[in-house]
Amino acid sequence: MVRFVLAAGVALLIFLGHSVAIPVVSDPTTTVFSAEATVPPDVPHTDVTSHGPYDGPSPTTTGALSTDVLAASIPALPPGPEAYSYPSDGQLHAPEPAPYTPAGGQGTNGSAPVYRVLSDFDYESIALGLYQEWIELDLFHWGLATFSDKDFEDAGLTAQDRYLIQFMAEQEVGHATLLSNILGGSAPKQCTYNYPVSNVREYVDFCQKLTRFGESGVYGFLNHLDSRPVGQLLLQSISTEARQQMIFRQFQGLFPMPVWFEVGTPQSWAWTLLAPYISSCPENQTRLIWQNYPSVYILNQPNPVRINGADVRNETTGGHANSLSTAGVPADQDCLNSDEVGVRCAPAVTNNRSTPLSYPGRQVFLRWDSQLNVTYSPLEEVRDNSGWTVQPNMSTYAGDPAVNGTMYLILTDEDLYVTPFNLTQVNPHVYGVAAKCPLRTSKWPVYVTKSSV
Ligand SMILES: *[C@@H]1O[C@H](CO)[C@@H](O)[C@H](O)[C@H]1NC(C)=O
Ligand SMILES: *[C@@H]1O[C@H](CO)[C@@H](O)[C@H](O)[C@H]1NC(C)=O
Ligand SMILES: *[C@@H]1O[C@H](CO)[C@@H](O)[C@H](O)[C@H]1NC(C)=O
Ligand SMILES: *[C@@H]1O[C@H](CO)[C@@H](O)[C@H](O)[C@H]1NC(C)=O
Ligand SMILES: *[C@@H]1O[C@H](CO)[C@@H](O)[C@H](O)[C@H]1NC(C)=O
Ligand SMILES: *[C@@H]1O[C@H](CO)[C@@H](O)[C@H](O)[C@H]1NC(C)=O
Ligand SMILES: *[C@@H]1O[C@H](CO)[C@@H](O)[C@H](O)[C@H]1NC(C)=O
Ligand SMILES: *[C@@H]1O[C@H](CO)[C@@H](O)[C@H](O)[C@H]1NC(C)=O
């Protein structure tokens, strides 16, 4: 007989006992009734929470969780003793544990995987991921509930597009359930939120940036987790989130994937970009260890709704995500009103609009975290908490400009050398964090506020 084993969310495996005649069914009809297997419940959630800034009594707890701090930073060390020992010559160097099975790997010795966090690092990282899933769940529902069908249609988004946003919200229920189950009873609960948007296009841009830093935040810690089984599950949810991010770019009429590599960031950067949009959380909410850095305002953040997206000053709805504002854009400068190829920005699979980026440095450095590379450029003419810098000209590999999508712009006091797997080492030197679109200008003013730690 033939048995089907359905591994939840993974794959349909077909177990062949002994061979049977395969029925040929050419009509798309249900021929065999099969009762649904046990359905695991979703985590309790509200589709749209209350919104707006917090105006209740003074919060009972504020600030990051902390314990004994052993040192101000982690010293840089040389590579570990085994780092260069494997020859990487295409030959096999050890007996095979089983046929077609190369020796080595983690979690490959047959021990049953346990989907459980193994350390403070794991817990705090997965809890951060859960905070992110919760805000996305709310944000996607909130947009659909807040803006009318006509509002969406005016932005070029149809009923089918709205259904896609709704489906994304449903995906978030699954992700929040998965991460809550991994953490157990202390898992952070859904909070209430406030979003810096007042129309559909601002909303779509904010969704695009929020999913961007959610994705990058996970990539930054995924391979550092102690629990590889947990990492596997998280990988399979964050891959879905990556697709959401790209779809929001398409909803904005942007080029869907302008880079060869996606950025991974330290957890504290993701938390810095997420926390400002949380108004309040339930009493006894599980808090996080991560640092919440000051916001960096990008004064000439490109505005994707403009025909000349680079020709802007102060057209965001605030610091942090630096998402776009439509408020000052006259109709004749709005790319949605253009029919010209290369200019128009109606939702599309792809529009070839180019919106490049930029960057800073001096004794205070602005740091571009672009794909694989990290680059510093000096912050010039620092006055009244603002300054400018020059966009670096660099590529990851020939043909791929390193800076060509939403980037992370970080203010630092030192140009420490870090690479994708030790990026977090720069954190003790960070003074501000922003998400930033690339632009064509060479001078990049930024505004650093100290008030929003
Ligand atoms: C980060 O890793 C690189 C090697 O990839 C190393 O050269 C550098 O010193 C490390 N930086 C710190 C601050 O540990
Ligand atoms: C298999 O590997 C796990 C770690 O992945 C380890 O805890 C376990 O002891 C190993 N089992 C055996 C039989 O070597
Ligand atoms: C919060 O925790 C305190 C102390 O553990 C407990 O007494 C209280 O009932 C909790 N409140 C809620 C709403 O769970
Ligand atoms: C940017 O605009 C906001 C209002 O939209 C204003 O509060 C802020 O002061 C402006 N910043 C600068 C540096 O012009
Ligand atoms: C798309 O834009 C790039 C520059 O960003 C340009 O090199 C290319 O020729 C454009 N292609 C089309 C079909 O417009
Ligand atoms: C950079 O991004 C633009 C879209 O914004 C795209 O047209 C262009 O091809 C990208 N450049 C490269 C070299 O990948
Ligand atoms: C960037 O560098 C390349 C290679 O050196 C050069 O051809 C190009 O003109 C430079 N672009 C800018 C804007 O400086
Ligand atoms: C990063 O970019 C800088 C500046 O273009 C370059 O000198 C350096 O080699 C790059 N590093 C890596 C690891 O690609």
Image (spheres, helix red, strand yellow):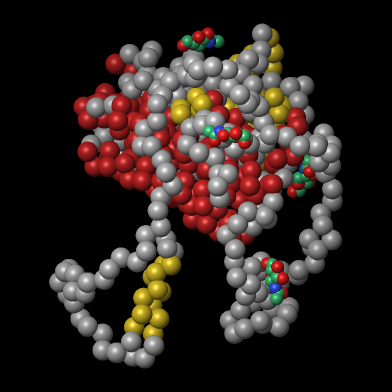
The N terminus sits in image quarter: bottom left
> What is the number of callouts on the image?
0
Q: Position of residue 191 (x, y in %)?
A: 48, 32
The residue at 58%/44% (across/down) is: 186
Q: Is residue 180 left or right of residue 202?
A: right
In depth, the one of 113 and 220 nearer the eye is 113
Q: At which x and y percent is residue 105?
A: 66, 69
166 vs 10: above or below? above
| Residue under the point 34% across and 66% down | 37
Q: Position of residue 8 (x, y in %)?
A: 42, 63
Task: Please determine whether, in this image, residue 44 is positioned above or below residue 282.
Answer: below
**Quadrant in which the C terminus is drawn:** top right
Q: Picture quarter containing residue 161?
A: top left
Describe residue 321's horizontal placement relative to residue 102 as left or right: left
User: Viewer-proximal residue, 248 or 333?
Assistant: 248
Identify the residue at image location x=71%, y=83%.
95
Residue 27 sits above or below residue 202 on the image: below
| Image quarter of residue 336 | top left
Q: Quick check: can you spot residue 220?
A: no
On screen, residue 31 versus residue 42, left or right, reads left
Residue at the (72%, 45%) spot, across then down:
422
Q: Is residue 144 left or right of residue 17?
A: left
Q: Position of residue 257 (x, y in %)?
A: 45, 43
- Does residue 14 appear in the picture of this structure? yes
